[in-house]
């Protein structure tokens, strides 16, 4: 009798411990899987208004690629390093692309641009490579005219190159499109500078400088790109939650071999798949973190690079570095997949903001060089200070986009203007550290 009571007591105790253990597991899973009920996307998720088809340069630019002779390898090398110019090949290329240039002119006359909106990895990206090659062909055309002494035609092609980059940069539909726009615009500004320094009339230099004033406001393009990036980030999270994308596939993006043609885990009931995903990824909590970070970057878009990054961005960068050291420990925290996704998705965005400062600096530097060139041609002397240029040669002096100084630095003796660069220090026009532009020999 006593033995039976003892055995029953052991069974009851074991059952109670098992129940407590099961209850503890349920409580832990509930706590770990509990997402916030709602989140504030900071207004970033709103879709842009659609542009009327007859105002959009995008379809006409695509149409131009139906008739082009694509640039050969030497064009790529020359466009980057401005060496190994092939006059005979350039002449053949420009003349064989007459119809292409005509179609590009027709497209750019609309001066508005909107490519398809990208929501996630399954959406097709616009023709990024096509944009790049369009830019290279325009630069070849400008240089070809310049070397033939046809300066008006050289100016026209160079300005259209800047406009092409500006449209893609400022009215982009994705972050990568924004970066391509910046690259094309930078190439155009380099060509404008080469053409501008070759002009022999101060009035023509003035006109060229005024044309560049129309293609500004890099902060607006950055904001548009960041809004597009947030919508993309949210779309990727939705794909993960819906089971259309696995975390492993997401890790394959950098390798360029991600396959999204099938739905992983299709054998598992949808409710089970979604439940498991929500246990390790809190969609709302993760979107909230992304929205707050992106919104802070956008808010810093109008500031100098030195002041662009708020406390959340600084903390995010520190967290990304810390995560690399203690990734396994992070997996024990709530929302472990979200804790991995956030630094991956945000790790390079502050570098994108640096690109914005660079193109702003390039645009302002070229405008100042043209203004200094026109001033010297008219007055037969160099100004003592940059303030002498405003408002007759430039509407106002541009700020240094890196440290926020109200004006670029100026060295009359060395015939150069410069911005401080990413170290935020005035290194006296050191071309290894500062951003330097010369306005003549």
Image (spheres, helix red, strand yellow):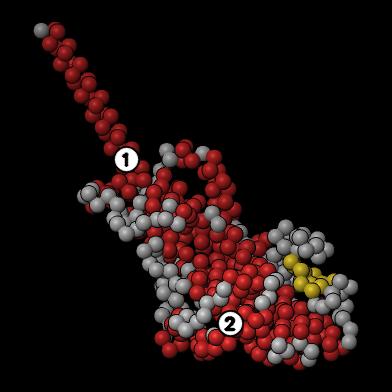
Eyeballing the image, is 20 above or below 435? above
Judge from the rendering whether residue 160 lies leftward or rightward of residue 172; answer left or right. right
Considering only order in the chain, which callout, 2 or 1, is on the residue closer to the N terminus? Answer: 1
The answer to whether one can see residue 294 in this image is yes
Q: Is mark 1 on a helix, strand or loop?
A: helix
Judge from the rendering whether residue 115 lies leftward or rightward of residue 270; answer left or right. right
Q: What element carries label 2?
A: helix
Q: Which of 200 and 209 is in front in this view?
A: 200
Query: Which residue, given by chain and number where applicable, does mark 1 sit on?
Result: 29
How many labels sit on residues?
2
Eyeballing the image, is 81 above or below 349? below
Place residue 93 in its image quadrant.
Answer: bottom right
Query: Which residue, given by chain and number where applicable, does mark 2 sit on?
Result: 93
Instruction: Kindly identify which numbered label has been placed on residue 16.
Output: none
Q: Nearer the viewer, residue 270 or 93?
A: 93
Report the Cα–Cα distance between label 1 and label 2.
Answer: 65 Å
């Amino acid at each position: 009798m006593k033995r039976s009571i003892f055995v029953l007591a052991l069974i009851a105790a074991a059952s109670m411990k098992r129940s407590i253990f099961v209850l503890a597991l349920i409580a832990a899973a509930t706590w770990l899987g509990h997402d916030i009920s709602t989140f504030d996307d900071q207004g970033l998720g709103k879709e842009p208004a659609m542009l009327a088809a007859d105002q959009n340069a995008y379809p006409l630019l695509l149409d131009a690629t139906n008739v082009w002779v694509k640039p050969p390898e030497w064009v790529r090398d020359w466009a980057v390093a401005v060496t190994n110019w092939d006059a005979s090949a350039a002449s053949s290329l420009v003349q064989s692309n007459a119809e292409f240039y005509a179609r590009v002119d027709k497209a750019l006359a609309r001066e508005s641009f909107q490519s398809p909106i990208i929501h996630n990895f399954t959406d097709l990206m616009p023709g990024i490579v096509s944009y790049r090659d369009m830019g290279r062909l325009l630069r070849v055309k400008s240089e070809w005219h310049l070397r033939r002494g046809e300066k008006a035609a050289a100016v026209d092609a160079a300005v259209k190159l800047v406009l092409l980059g500006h449209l893609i940069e400022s009215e982009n539909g994705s972050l990568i499109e924004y970066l391509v726009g910046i690259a094309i615009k930078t190439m155009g500004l380099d060509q404008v500078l080469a053409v501008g320094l070759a002009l022999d009339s101060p009035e023509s230099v003035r006109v060229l400088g005024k044309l560049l004033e129309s293609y500004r406001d890099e902060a607006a393009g950055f904001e548009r790109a960041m809004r597009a990036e947030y919508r993309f980030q949210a779309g990727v999270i939705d794909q993960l939650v819906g089971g259309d994308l696995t975390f492993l596939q997401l890790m394959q993006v950098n390798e360029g071999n991600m396959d999204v043609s099938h739905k992983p885990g299709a054998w598992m009931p949808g409710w089970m798949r979604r439940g498991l995903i929500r246990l390790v990824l809190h969609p709302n909590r993760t979107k909230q973190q992304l929205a707050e970070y992106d919104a802070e970057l956008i808010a810093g878009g109008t500031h100098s690079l030195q002041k662009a990054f708020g406390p959340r961005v600084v903390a995010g960068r520190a967290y990304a570095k810390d995560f690399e050291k203690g990734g396994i420990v992070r997996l024990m925290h709530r929302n472990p997949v979200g804790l991995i996704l956030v630094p991956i998705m945000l790790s390079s965005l502050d570098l994108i903001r640096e690109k914005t400062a660079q193109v702003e600096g390039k645009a302002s530097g070229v405008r100042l060089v043209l203004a200094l060139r026109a001033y010297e041609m008219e007055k037969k002397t160099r100004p003592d200070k940059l303030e002498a240029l405003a408002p007759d040669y430039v509407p106002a002096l541009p700020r240094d986009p890196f440290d926020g100084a109200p004006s670029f630095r100026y060295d009359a003796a060395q015939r150069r203007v410069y911005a401080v660069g990413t170290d935020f220090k005035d290194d006296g026009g050191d071309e290894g550290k500062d951003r330097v532009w010369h306005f003549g020999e």
